[in-house]
């Protein structure tokens, strides 16, 4: 008997009829067994993985987030304004980024 693939891709329409089979494949496979559901026109697929694998990946991401130090710029930057004026202007720029702008649909 051949060893099942660790990663398989299935169209989402095909997966509908094979959902229980695919769930069993992931459940009985190792933590690295993944079924990727692909949909025509979608930028990326969706993955079916074991819950234990998802928990592991989430914990790894949390650990990586803890160990990364914030970026600090060091060098000879000199401001032509006070630090408070600079921070105020930076906040204003950031507010402009978050405002919704109307889409130009023609």
Image (cartoon, helix red, strand yellow):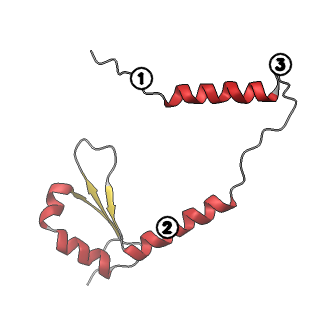
Name the quadrant of the N terminus. Answer: bottom left
Rounded to the nearest whole Å, what is the CA distance between mark 1 and mark 3? 31 Å
Q: Which residue is mark 3?
A: 80
What element does badge 2 sit on?
helix
- Residue 35: image location, x then y, percent: 30, 65
- Residue 74: image location, x then y, percent: 83, 38
Question: Sequence order check: which comes first, mark 1 or mark 2?
Answer: 2
Name the quadrant of the C terminus. Answer: top left
Q: Which residue is mark 1?
A: 101
On screen, residue 67 versus residue 1, left or right, reads right
Q: Which residue is mark 2?
A: 57
Q: Which residue: 53% across, 28% down?
A: 97
Q: Is residue 3 visible?
A: no
Which disc, if any, is residue 64? none
**Number of other residues with Cα within 10 Å of mark 2, as a class: few under 14, some 14 to 19, many 20 or more:** few
Above or below — where is 57 with respect to 101? below
- Residue 15: image location, x then y, percent: 18, 62
Question: Sequence order check: which comes first, mark 2 or mark 3?
Answer: 2
């Amino acid at each position: 008997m051949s060893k099942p693939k660790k990663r398989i891709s299935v169209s989402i329409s095909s997966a509908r009829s094979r959902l229980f089979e695919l769930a069993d494949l992931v459940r009985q496979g190792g933590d690295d067994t993944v079924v990727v559901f692909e949909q025509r026109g979608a930028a990326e697929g969706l993955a079916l993985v074991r819950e234990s694998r998802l928990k592991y990946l989430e914990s790894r991401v949390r650990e990586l987030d803890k160990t990364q130090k914030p970026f600090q710029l060091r060098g000879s930057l000199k401001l032509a304004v006070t630090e408070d004026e600079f921070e105020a202007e930076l906040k204003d720029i950031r507010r402009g980024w978050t405002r919704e702008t109307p889409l130009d649909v023609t």
